[in-house]
Image: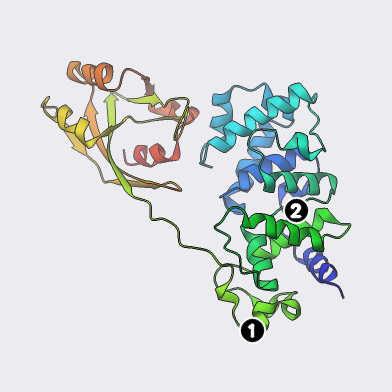
Amino acid sequence: MSYQTYLLEWFDKNKRQMPWRERRDAYSIWVSEIMLQQTQVDTVRPYYERFMERFPTVKDLATADKEEVYTYWQGLGYYRRADNLHKGAKVVANQYEGVFPMEAKLVKDIPGIGPYTLGAVLSIAFNLPYPAVDGNVMRVLSRQFLIEEDIAIAKTRKIFEAKVMSLMPADARNFNQALMELGALICTPKNPKCESCPMQSLCLAYEEGVQMEYPVKTGKVKAEPEFYKALVIREGDNIYLEKRKDEGLLASLWGTPLVTLEQWVEIEKMGLQYEVLEQVKHVFTHRIWMMSPVVITYNEQVEKIICNILQNTGEFVPKSLIKTYPVATAFTKILRKL
């Protein structure tokens, strides 16, 4: 049997049931692929179903308020994905009358769609021969064909895309998904299940016993921690939340105010009574926030802090309504400490 036959037969028998695999329209595939970026399948399932129930078409998403979109995204993290998906929906709705384009040159101009998402949507939705190369695919192919190039280097993707295209059968839809599924279920980063791999007889790394040496990847730069005090300002059953700026990390989301340690020194000089809770750690891709929650009861002095240091960018929210705000996960961790 050919390489493609081995892989496609395995996929047909072993593919996981997923809600987005029950639909082939481009919008559904697009939403699922954006959600699946840096997020596990089992985590995505309930969010996807809830999101699609509220925004069943691209026009529904395009006409929605951004904060409502964030609310339905809450818990998935990486909110820039939701922001770009929302912007992209507006482009598709306004420029293409709600019909996702099939031409790559048009798709690549939609906000938030990079080479992988472009290939995934066009191949899965329309069965067009475009490569969808993610980490799973690079790992699978680097092992099977002993590809030595460093996958941490951006231009290496082109090498893997070319390899996918050299193998691409007429069934592009299932071929791309099969490669990804093999990487997710069998050819995993640690402890790959080589004994049950359908490609074992064709895998050069297995033949030479060097599976764990692939893919080649340079070490990541260690993220440096940043230290903050998180001000949990209470007024009865209300908590002061601020809306973050429209640009930058966690843009347009809500949370408890953060102040630097230098700012906290100035606040402490005011002689406030406060309670310090257990430190909260939140890891981003390139940085780590170490946040010490400080619970303060609202009074005139705190009003000065809100106006002068926090620049009055928030509002007091009843505890029962906080869940209706798009609160970033980093701050949800803090609120759980209360």
Q: Pointers 2 and 1 in contact (CB under 8 A)?
A: no
Question: Front-most of 219 and 139?
Answer: 219
In the image, taking residue 273 as reference, residue 204 lies left or right, namely right
In the image, taking residue 158 as reference, residue 301 lies left or right, namely left
Question: Looking at the image, which residue is at 86% across and 57% down?
Answer: 171
Q: Amino acid at mark 2?
A: Pro
In the image, taking residue 16 as reference, residue 247 lies left or right, namely left
In the picture of the structure, the residue carrying the numbered disc 2 is 131
Q: Amino acid at mark 1?
A: Glu
On-image quarter of the C terminus: top left
- Give the quadrant of residue 280: top left
Question: Front-most of 272 and 3?
Answer: 3
Question: Looking at the image, which residue is at 20% across and 34% down?
Answer: 262
- Give the quadrant of residue 162: bottom right
Q: Is residue 331 above or below residue 66?
A: below
Q: Is residue 143 above or below residue 26?
A: below
In the picture of the structure, the residue carrying the numbered disc 1 is 208
User: In the image, residue 189 lies at what x, y percent?
Assistant: 56, 67
On-image quarter of the N terminus: bottom right
Question: What secondary structure is found at the residue carrying circle 1?
Answer: helix
Question: What secondary structure is found at the residue carrying circle 2?
Answer: loop
User: Which labelled disc corresponds to residue 109?
Assistant: none
Question: Looking at the image, which residue is at 44% across and 40% down?
Answer: 329
* Gap between marks 2 and 1 measured at Cα: 28 Å
User: In the image, residue 49 lies at what x, y percent?
Assistant: 67, 41
User: In the image, residue 315 lies at what x, y percent?
Assistant: 37, 19
Question: Front-most of 85 and 70?
Answer: 85
| Mark 1 burial class by Cα count in 10 Å: few <14, some 14-19, many 20+ | few
